[in-house]
Image (cartoon, rainbow, N blue to C red):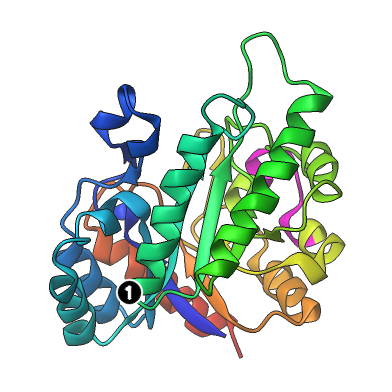
Amino acid sequence: MKLGYSTITWGGVVGHPVGVTSIKDLFYMTHGPMDRAIKDIAAAGYEGVEMFDGNLAEYADKPEQLRSILDEAGVTLASVYTGGNFIYADILPDELHRIQRAAELAATFGAERLVVGGGARRATGTTDEDYRRLGESLDRVTDIAESAGLSASYHPHLTTIVENPDELDRLMGLTRIGFCPDTAHLAAGGGDPAALIRKYPDRIRHVHLKDLRKDPFAFLPLGQGELDFPDIVQAISESGYDSWLMVELDEYDGDPRSAAEISRRYLEELLP
């Protein structure tokens, strides 16, 4: 398996401000410096990086600059993260326009994976029709990704329509998109990450590794929280998945490179 790291830790996640009034421009972003993040990730011993679609879009008119940063660091852009609301018919074309652009940019910079999260929860409550619409929308996302030569996967996430195991079960039969288990989000949603990986082994197309402390709640570097990573890694191995393991940490009270190094050392001890 190959080890990568997400640039999210270098600034956290925000939405592009233009997206407040323009759905097609509502990219995910981190406000940290991408050149530093990529260099730090490489220095910590990782082979690849994952970036948000909004940060990638910043290099759309200067692609050689990002290629140079990646080449000098000796790492690959493995995956790109994006997402949407997906259940509202009126704005879906604009959301898919944004995802189309993200997929094209990902392919331009040599990424293999498009990871999507999302699915809004209505103020009036989530309906069966919402899950049907989400499933259909994710099939269209899969088509977009495949047309760009990418593999697409869906990432269950807190505050979205798919947080807990029952909600994941409702979705999986309604779409052909791959599954990106995020170990901490699955656990925070009340699931057993290893058990869910074992339940859907043939759907796994990407993996996010992140540790968790439930009380007080915090996402943590690997080995610093409560999750059973020996069992999680065993479940991943049993599934036959042998590609990118992407370590992710939404924020860190300290040097983000230090957090990356903590997780890398832990994985060195854990992986054969």
| Residue under the point 59% across and 50% down | 184
User: Which quadrant of the figure has residue 207?
Assistant: bottom right
The quadrant in which the C terminus is found is: bottom right
Q: Nearer the viewer, residue 169 or 232?
A: 169
Q: Position of residue 228 (x, y in %)?
A: 68, 62
User: Which residue type carries mark 1?
Assistant: Phe
Range covered by the magenta-colored residues = 186-194
In magenta stretch: residue 262: no
x 80%, y 69%: residue: 201
Quarter of the image with the N terminus in it: bottom right
User: Residue 63 location, x and y as percent?
Assistant: 19, 70
Q: Residues within 10 Å of mark 1 (few under 14, many from 20)?
A: many
Residue 66: which quarter of the image?
bottom left
Instruction: Indicate the position of residue 93 as horizontal and vertical percent values.
Output: 52, 37
In the displayed structure, 223 sits above or below 52; it is below
The image shows residue 174, relative to residue 150, as above or below, that is above
Q: How many numbered marks does the figure carry?
A: 1
State left or right for residue 51 relative to residue 155: left
Q: Which residue is mark 1?
A: 109
Look at 35% across and 42% down and name the residue there: 27
Q: Position of residue 109 (x, y in %)?
A: 32, 74
- In the picture, measured across the screen, residue 59 lies left or right of residue 141, that is left
